[in-house]
Amino acid sequence: QGSGLDKPAAVIVETVQGEGGINVARPEWLRALKELCERQDMLLIVDDIQMGCGRTGAFFSFEEAGITPDIVTVSKSISGYGLPMSLCLFRPELDVWEPGEHNGTFRGNNPAFVTATAALHMYWTDDQMEKHTRARGEQVGQALLALCDESGAEGARCRGRGLVWGLEFSRTERASEVCRRAFELGLLLETSGTRSEVVKLLPPLTISADETDEGLRTLARAVRDTG
Ligand SMILES: Cc1ncc(COP(=O)(O)O)c(C=O)c1O
């Protein structure tokens, strides 16, 4: 009755928080959020910039939950070749732009459009990429679970989906120590999480089983060396 705040116009969410510490949203939670947005007449925006383009298996990270967001952002891997490109996808009825109205420095980067189209044809006209990512993801998940059970890794916990995994340590600084040691051993890793308490694994989706094993062995050694 004129007293409260307006409802939010939209909710924006990552299905797996990338920089936030590899926090994986449950499919039921995502479905409940979608229903809440529908009931309250709010738009659901999925930021798929880091988790989309096949990172979790399917092309979009929300497919597994069976939801259709109103707006989706993708970037990073979308150009397939490291060229700057980003897309904001939305339902046609939400499109209030006049042709050419939404302009800016990075819009319409032609080489990126060419490589993005090539990447879509090369990787997304069958399910090979998705199957490969899921298989590699299981390989990573099993290795991390085994690593967490090792005596030198007490208090370590792992979580992830597809080819995005996080290894969290109860002693916060250990994640940075592991990354530093891994770098000395030839493996590039970064930390994530509000206190940089998570070692983040984000290998290329084209990685082979042998390369994955090699990386996981190096990671295990880095964990042991910092125990
Ligand atoms: C989830 C997420 N959203 C947005 C961004 C920013 O993307 P851009 O630089 O394309 O604006 C990033 C970059 O790391 C990201 O991880």
Image: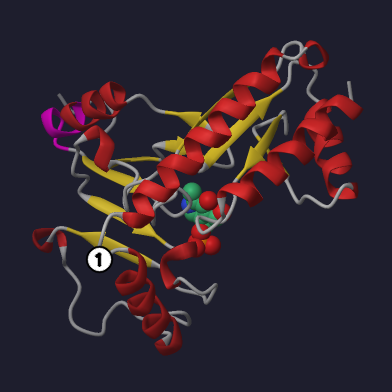
Viewer-nearest residue: 124 or 176? 124
Q: Residue at x 51, y 59 (%)?
A: 206
Left or right of residue 105: residue 12:
left
- The tally of labels here is 1
Residue 14, horizontal then vertical, whole percent: 41, 40
Specify the quadrant of the image occupied by residue 42: top left
**Residue 32 sits above or below residue 95 on the image:** above
**94 or 49, nearer to the observer:** 49
Q: Nearer the viewer, residue 119 or 51?
A: 119
Farthest residue in the bottom direction? 110
> Which residue corresponds to the image point at 68% horizontal and 18% vertical from the top-left?
148
Q: Is residue 36 visible?
A: yes
Q: Is residue 111 left or right of residue 28?
A: right
Q: Residue at x 32, y 53 (%)?
A: 59
Q: Is residue 45 magenta?
A: no
On the image, the x and y values in percent for residue 127 come to 28, 54
**Residue 70 in the image: above or below residue 227:** below
Q: Residue furthest front?
A: 210
Q: Position of residue 96 (x, y in %)?
A: 16, 67
Depicted 20 relative to depicted 114: above or below: above
Span highlighted in magenta in the image: 36-41
**Residue 56 appears left or right of 38:** right
Residue 119 is left or right of residue 69, and the answer is: right
| Residue 8 appears in the rendering | no
Chief secondary structure of the magenta portion: helix
Q: Which amino acid, by three-letter code, is at mark 1? A: Thr
Q: Report the quarter where the N terminus lies.
A: top left
Dot 1: few (<14), some (14–19), or many (≥20) neighbours within 10 Å? few
**Element marked by disc 1:** loop
Q: Position of residue 101 (x, y in %)?
A: 26, 81
Q: Which residue is mark 1?
A: 125
The quarter in which the C terminus is drawn is: top right
